[in-house]
Amino acid sequence: MIKVKALVADDSKVMRGIVMTTLRGSQLAEFEFIEAENGEEALEKFNPNEIDMVFIDWNMPKMTGVDFTRKARGKAGAQDTPIVLVTSEKAMGKMEMALDEAGASAYVCKPFTSEDIVRKIGKFIEMIGEKKQKTSRGGFFGKLLGGG
């Protein structure tokens, strides 16, 4: 099973727990989590070379999930990192703004089920797996063994 390091940012400790429990229960991957209480803390902890995926609440103090997404996309190497907004916002215009303007990869509306999570992020887990396979075949020993 693929290992995925995920950053989970929400000002509610309970909601962070729900997101992490749902992801573990999805059995899409073996998840390791880094938690943040707000967008500023999430941005400090976000390193696209270490974090495979981000789950971030839309409405938080200090920095919203949308603002985090805009700033995170500006970091080198962050363009391919899936960023999933977890939100109670259901207005289509707001969703389009988050996806098109801010650069979010997907969104999940609260309350959500594990089926919602699987449907929304399954393709990203596959993408992360493929990326990790390519990386593991690269380098000197990968070339020596006929990898990348």
Image (cartoon, rainbow, N blue to C red):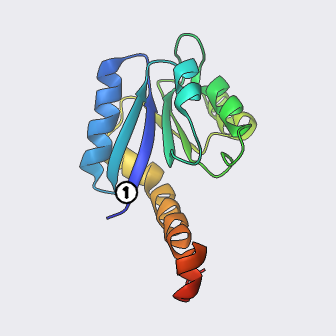
**Residue at the spot 34% in from the left edge and 56% down from the top edge:** 29
The front one of 111 and 145 is 145
**Residue at the spot 46% in from the left edge and 65% down from the top edge:** 129
Q: Where's residue 132, x and y in %?
A: 50, 65
Asked which quadrant contains residue 95, the reply is: top right
Q: Quadrant of the N terminus?
A: bottom left
Q: Secondary structure at mark 1?
A: strand
Question: In the image, is residue 72 above or below residue 138?
Answer: above
Question: In the image, is residue 108 above or below residue 125?
Answer: above
- The reply to whether residue 137 is in sight is yes
Residue farthest toward the top in the current orientation of the protein: 61
Question: In the image, is residue 39 above or below residue 102?
Answer: above
**Residue 93 falls left or right of residue 118:** right
Q: Where's residue 100, x and y in %?
A: 72, 40
Residue farthest toward the bottom in the current orientation of the protein: 146
Asked which quadrant contains residue 21, the reply is: top left
**Residue 95 falls left or right of residue 87:** right
- The reply to whether residue 90 is in sight is no
Q: Which residue is mark 1?
A: 3
**Residue 50 falls left or right of residue 98:** left
The front one of 138 and 110 is 138
The front one of 116 and 135 is 135
Answer few, some or many: residues within 10 Å of disc 1's Cα (few below 14, many 20 plus, some between 14 and 19).
Answer: some
Q: Quadrant of the C terminus?
A: bottom right
The front one of 126 and 75 is 75
Instruction: Tell me the amino acid under the disc marked 1.
Output: Lys
**Residue at the spot 37% in from the left edge and 17% down from the top edge:** 12
**Residue at the spot 58% in from the left edge and 11% down from the top edge:** 62
Q: Where's residue 111, x and y in %?
A: 36, 29
Q: How many marks?
A: 1
